[in-house]
Image: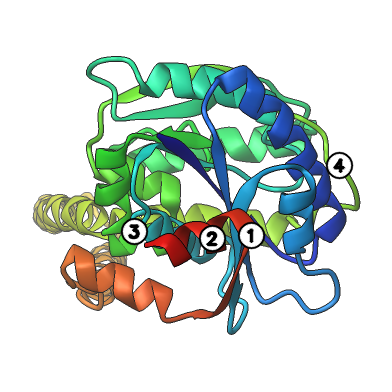
């Protein structure tokens, strides 16, 4: 049995080479052979090299994408490819920059191999973010729960059982936000405390706008839940508008309202109601644009972005024997 390691790489050749060296060490600790699936997300200047995998004594493949599709879509393509591989005991998703540490993989694998567990996710036990990031992240978590009713406390570093791999790789939501798709898949989850590592080389390309977009993508996965809550808010707003208008009329008839006050209050309440209704309608239109392909078709569409596949000698010889 083999463990597939899916990692997206974009212009980070040096970090990927270091990751492969450390994966070789973790492979011995895990006691299971690793098969690296590096998804080259359209790199031009510093693409991941197949020699980094073979030089570390690992088997693996590099999927060269025809264009840059983004971090989450690249992961979903790697999952779709991993789902085709035989004799997998698990599939690990991790970043290639060093912040997801290979030393944590044995703990994730031990957790996902336990009974009644479909997926083991890395729960950050130690963070090194700035105070401003922690503040915005705390606000985001509360907004996310308010809009969706869900809790999202983990990222992309995870280990999936073969059954979980088949389910997540068949969800079109995975190309939008992998962690959000995992929550929506209702998998039995184990949280494994892990510390965040430091980058092997270079600087992170994740900035504040990118983080905001990433958070919005998580909300998009639960567009149906957001729409339901917006509809309930619209009903509540309609009831509030009726109460305000009735109250304003009663005060007018009782002689407590100044001239023009009823018109201002009623107009404000109605405009608020109309704005809420329009926002709900827009949410409905956006959510209706989601694809409803069957899982096999979702995987086929994801793999259409793969322009070329480079394999290590061990993988090529194995395929030749088949």
Above or below, 259 against 140 in this view is below
Marks 4 and 1, how far apart in space?
A: 27 Å
> Foreground: 160 or 308?
308
Residue 179: which quarter of the image? top left
Quadrant for the N terminus in the image:
top left
Residue at the (49%, 65%) spot, across then down = 73
Residue 315 makes an appearance in the image: yes
Above or below, 57 against 159 in this view is below
Which numbered disc flags the more N-terminal residue, 4 or 2? 4
On the image, the x and y values in percent for residue 40 come to 65, 68
Outermost residue, right side: 202
Answer yes or no: do the residues labelled 4 and 1 have beta carbons within 8 Å? no
Q: List the residue tagged with mark 2.
A: 317
Marks 1 and 2, how far apart in space?
A: 6 Å
Residue density around tag 1, few if under 14, some if 14–19, many if 20 or more, within 10 Å: few
Q: List the residue tagged with mark 4.
A: 200
Answer yes or no: do the residues labelled 3 and 2 have beta carbons within 8 Å? no
Q: Nearer the viewer, mark 4 or mark 1?
A: 1
Residue at the (60%, 38%) spot, across then down = 137
Residue 59: image tag: none
Q: List the residue tagged with mark 1.
A: 313
Which numbered disc flags the more N-terminal residue, 4 or 1? 4
Badge 2 marks a residue whose secondary structure is helix
Residue density around tag 2, few if under 14, some if 14–19, many if 20 or more, within 10 Å: few
> Foreground: 72 or 93?
93
């Amino acid at each position: 049995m083999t463990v597939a390691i899916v990692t997206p790489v974009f212009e980070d050749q040096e970090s990927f080479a270091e990751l492969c060296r450390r994966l070789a060490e973790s492979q011995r600790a895990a006691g299971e052979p690793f098969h690296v699936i590096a998804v080259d997300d359209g790199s031009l200047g510093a693409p991941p090299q197949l020699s980094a995998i073979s030089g570390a004594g690992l088997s693996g493949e590099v999927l060269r994408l025809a264009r840059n599709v983004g971090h989450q879509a690249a992961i979903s393509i790697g999952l779709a490819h991993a789902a085709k591989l035989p004799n997998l005991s698990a599939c690990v998703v991790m970043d290639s920059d060093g912040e997801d540490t290979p030393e944590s993989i044995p703990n994730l694998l031990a957790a996902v191999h336990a009974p009644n567990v479909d997926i083991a996710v890395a729960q950050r036990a130690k963070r090194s973010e700035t105070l401003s990031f922690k503040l915005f992240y705390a606000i985001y978590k509360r907004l996310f729960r308010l809009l969706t009713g869900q809790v999202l406390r983990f990222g992309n570093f995870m280990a999936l059982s073969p059954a979980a791999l088949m389910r997540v790789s068949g969800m079109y939501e995975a190309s939008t936000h992998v962690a959000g798709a995992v929550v929506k898949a209702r998998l039995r989850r184990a949280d494994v405390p892990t510390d965040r590592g430091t980058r092997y080389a270079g600087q992170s390309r994740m900035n504040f706008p990118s983080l905001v977009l990433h958070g919005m993508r998580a909300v998009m996965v639960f567009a149906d839940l957001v729409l339901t809550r917006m509809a309930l808010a619209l009903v509540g707003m309609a009831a509030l508008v009726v109460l305000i208008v009735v109250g304003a009329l009663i005060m007018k008839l009782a002689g407590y309202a100044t001239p023009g006050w009823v018109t201002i209050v009623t107009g404000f309440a109605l405009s608020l109601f109309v704005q809420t209704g329009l926002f709900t309608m827009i949410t409905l239109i956006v959510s209706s644009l989601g694809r409803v392909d069957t899982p096999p078709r979702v995987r086929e569409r994801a793999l259409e972005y793969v322009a070329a596949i480079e394999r290590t000698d061990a993988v090529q010889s194995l395929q030749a024997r088949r």
